Amino acid sequence: MKLVVQIPCYNESESLQHTIPQLPRAVPGFTCVEWLVVDDGSVDGTAQVAKALGVDHVVRHPVNRGLAAAFMTGLEAAVDLGADVIVNTDADNQYDARDIETLVRPIVEGQAEMVVGARPIGDTEHFSWVKKKLQRLGSWVVRVASRTQVADAPSGFRAFTREAAQRLNVFSAYTYTLETIIQAGQSNIRVLSVPVRTNPDLRPSRLVKSMRHYVWRSAATIVRIFATYRPLAFFGLIASFFLAVGFLLGGWYVFHMLIGQGTGHVQSAVLAAASVTIGFLLFMLGFIADLTSVNRRLLEGIDWRLRQVEGEVRRAREQEPRA
């Protein structure tokens, strides 16, 4: 089997000098291990440094397209290279490369199709108390939305089977970490979480510009993905709130009508009618979105099949004898 270790990069010429030498060239269960760097429009010579450090494959975006786009480019390139398993890691040497073996073991043993490395959040010194609590809260929300047991949802240290990589589609331009877990859980991809070690911090995170920015962007991503993959539940929750308010106000108005004081509570009846109407419309919107999601799942299946066929055609052409 072939393992490809991919690293999305943006202006990482300095950090790659610490990260690349730590990557393994042999992993139990694999006959071939190759390294892939995705240069996301860097201007500091990241691609040249990667090649000088012995990276097997370098794919470059002409302009910076964001972490999520670089991640997806890496998956597509790794599949094209014939990878049976793909490991994604960060360029800043955050994750201990020795744990790549730990990360891929559940896949080699047939226990999972996607494995996420869980960092020791509580023991990470450069994480503030607030960030640790937010990481745990965010991971809990993702577990609920994805119906998986991933302990560290924002972790970028993860492994995928070839088939799982072909089934993933990332729409967010911000990050891939949360979206891929929720998508995998909703697509019945077997997801496991394993503990991994981390290295000392080389530099501040570029993704987390500020805690407020990180929380806002992550929350927006979770809400959008939850609405995409579980629309009936998402709109149903909001509809339930308005329906509950409507029935409470309606009950309040009926009670005062029965005791002869309904004239002074007409506003309650108006608000009750408005709330019930809004709740009903939201429920219907969720129902329609749920029906639409059936088409999305069908299209995802077609896209997966097309990727498989394209890969088979490409391999067949490569094996054809040249004239």
Image (spheres, rainbow, N blue to C red):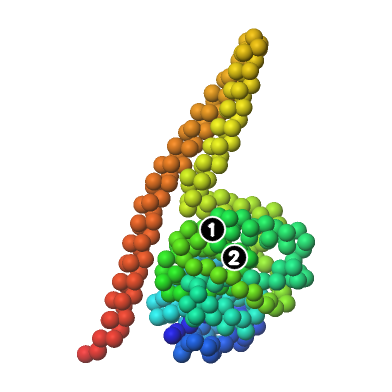
Indicate the position of residue 124 as horizontal and vertical percent values.
74, 71
Q: Residue at x 48, y 45 (%)?
A: 232
Indicate the position of residue 143 as horizontal and vertical percent values.
59, 59
Mark drawn on residue 301: none
Mark drawn on residue 150: 2
| Quadrant in the picture for residue 131 | bottom right
Give the residue pinned by disc 1. 146
Element carrying mark 2: loop
Q: Amino acid at mark 1?
A: Ser
Indicate the position of residue 3 as horizontal and vertical percent values.
48, 82
Q: Residue at x 30, y 84 (%)?
A: 318
Which residue is more in the foreground, 302 or 200? Answer: 302
Which residue is more in the foreground, 1 or 307? Answer: 1
- Tell me if label 2 and label 1 are in contact, CB under 8 Å: yes
Element carrying mark 1: helix
Going by the picture, which residue comes out furthest to the left? 323
Q: Quadrant of the N terminus?
A: bottom left
Q: Amino acid at mark 2?
A: Val
